[in-house]
Amino acid sequence: MAINHFSIRVYGILFDDNKRILVSDEFIRGHYFTKFPGGGLELGEGTRDCLKREFKEETFLDVEVGNHLYTTDYFQPSVFNPSDQIISIYYFVEAKDVSNLAVKTKIFDFEPHQVADPKAQSEVLRWVEWNEFNEDAVSLPIDKIVVHMLKASMS
């Protein structure tokens, strides 16, 4: 199969004071995913600026981008379009105050109107306890690698 495009995605790893990690439960084109907050790099944008913008859009938080954790080092086709290649970049991020962050406590806890249109896209945020955080806590293949790396480095 010929690869037509590639998409660069930038994601943030955010812990709170209780060692919980932030994930985004998303409904995209009729499918449910859990992933790290972040998104697509725009032309003319640096990866750190992209992550700051994405966090502001998705969480309304101003974050400081910290150390680089991982960049995809293998071929990964897009879940949505197998003729596109995904390159994902992960950084640790910090936020001064997460007390006003709108979060859910259950996975895929969407309001009915958020998932009524199968062509629509919605997202809700959720904290995952560190002791419950594992590769099954996220949906995307590259995120699973990052979870494994986090658990190995912090055990």
Image (spheres, rainbow, N blue to C red):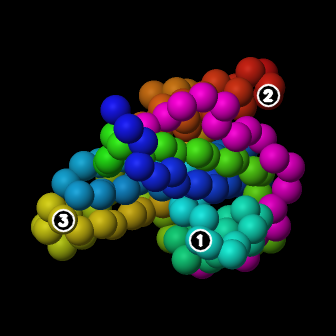
Image point (41%, 49%), residue name = 4
Residue 24 at least partly seen: yes
Whether residue 143 is situated above or below residue 125 in the rendered picture: above
Rendered location of residue 151, percent (x, y): 70, 26
Question: Cα distance, mark 3 to mark 1?
Answer: 23 Å
Q: For mark 3, does the 10 Å Cα neighbourhood hold few (<14), some (14 to 19), or many (20 or more) residues?
A: few
Badge 1 local density, few (<14 within 10 Å), some, or many (20+)?
A: few
Inspect the image, locate mark 2, and give the three-letter code of the amino acid beneath it: Met
Q: Tell which of 33 and 45 is nearer to you.
A: 45
Q: Is residue 109 left or right of residue 143?
A: left
Q: Is residue 62 magenta?
A: yes
Do the residues bearing badges 2 and 1 touch, measured as CB atoms within 8 Å? no
Q: Secondary structure at mark 3?
A: loop
Report x, y in % for residue 70. 73, 39
In the rendered image, residue 14, in percent from the top left (x then y), is placed at: 70, 53
Quadrant where the N terminus lies? top left
Q: Which mark is residue 154?
A: 2
* Residue in the image at 18% along x and 73% along y: 113
Q: Was residue 8 drawn as part of the magenta stretch in this picture?
A: no
Instruction: Name the residue furthest front.
Output: 2
User: In the displayed structure, does residue 120 sit left or right of residue 124?
Assistant: left
Mark count: 3
Q: Where 26 sits versus 134, above or below?
A: below
Please name the residue shown 73% across and 62% down the image: 47
Which of the labelled discs sits on residue 76, or is there none? none
Q: Which mark is residue 42?
A: 1
Extent of the magenta region: 60-79
Between label 2 and label 1, give the one nearer the viewer.
1
Measure the alpha-carbon separation of dots 2 and 1: 32 Å
On-image quarter of the C terminus: top right
For label 3, the residue is 119
